Amino acid sequence: MSDLVLANARVVTPDEAFGGAVRVADGRIAAVERGDAVPAGAVDAGGDLVIPGLVELHTDVLERHAFPRPSVHWPEAAAVVAYDTHLASSGITTTFDSLSVGYVIDTRQRPRDPSALARAIAAAQAQGRLRAEHFLHIRCEVATEGVVDDYARLAAHELVRLVSLMDHTPGQRQFVNVDKYREYYGGKYGLSTAEIEALIEARRADHARYAAVHRAALAQDCQARGLTLVSHDDATLAHVEEAAKIGTAVAEFPTTLEAARAARAYGIAILAGAPNLVCGRSHSGNIAAADLAAVGLLDILSSDYVPASLLHGALLLHLRHGLALPDAIRTVTATPAACVGLNDRGALIPGRRADLLRVRLDGDLPIIEAAWRQGRRIG
């Protein structure tokens, strides 16, 4: 007997979209059926989309909940629950919470040591307080002095699955255009001209001193622990070759077409930002996500700093940029799940987890009418 039936829906499977129903039993998808009948006791979806719950590999939003203002440190347990509700309301049923280590500049707007947040996530999950399922993604700024020690405090945590190796040094990767570095960090932190120039000089010196040795040490430790490696802001063939040599699985936010093509050649999944897609451009002046999609070089979307952009961006791939609906939905469901070994979710296939969304389209804006994780209503 089914615990839940969503009928009269536009069902999106990995390969097609059709009018039909999804049956759920014991937290799993029991059947996916065609037809517009609404059996007794079923939820009439009224033609809304029914898709898998979204899988997010990179979101920075938790730190904003924990440190909403400079010098304001919100209680970790409360921050985690509020953040989780934010994600669930955006349709995210599986998330990799990004916790950053290694400082570009310390403004007291994120923790130097995020271990307390990691413990709060694990505790809230164990206590059944969370709507989405949470894992951890450690973001390591390799060209900073203390990053290896900061990483080591988190690396053995039970929820850590992903580690990204980042380098935001001015003049390369995200900030090939140094004026964009001045614009971004000067504006973000309210720095004077003299302060931003001093920061640029200091960051370049740190890069020369730390970047290569820290990248190698972190990659070696991740390989030993079996953690999935992610590259960040690759701009050149050399960047991608470096990533491929250490077994990188995902290239986050490649900044050029050259880097994206190289990632594809090496079999590295290409992740782009959904906010880039929604806004139609990169805020750093790099390649647009839509341009990557146009040449078939976009595998995964990430909401990055706007959780609601994840579903919105995926649907824009279909509605504005010509991807078939199943292909667009895979960028936020089956493909990211597979890249991190979560093959029990991300697709409307019998036997998979019943992580589901019912979505109504208002023009090109998605409205999430309901969400379920393992068959339990979470939104």
Image: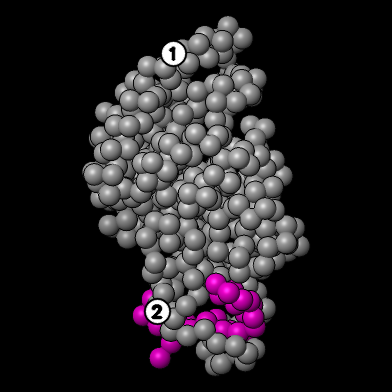
72 with respect to 217 (left or right): right
Numbered circle sitting on residue 205: 1
Identify the residue at horizontal 67%, vertical 53% (top origin). 295
Identify the residue at horizontal 26%, vertical 39% (top origin). 221
Tell us which disc is closer to us: 2 or 1. 1
Residue type indicated by callout 2: Gly
- Name the residue beneath numbered marker 2: 351
Q: Which residues are magenta?
A: 1-27
Classify mark 2: residues with Cα within 10 Å, few (<14), some (14-19) or many (20+): some
Identify the residue at horizontal 56%, vertical 21% (top origin). 171
**Residue 24: in magenta span:** yes
Comes first in the chain, label 2 or label 1: 1
Classify mark 1: residues with Cα within 10 Å, few (<14), some (14-19) or many (20+): some
154 with respect to 15 (left or right): left
Whether residue 244 is situated above or below residue 360 in the rendered picture: above
Whether residue 376 is situated above or below residue 22 in the rendered picture: above
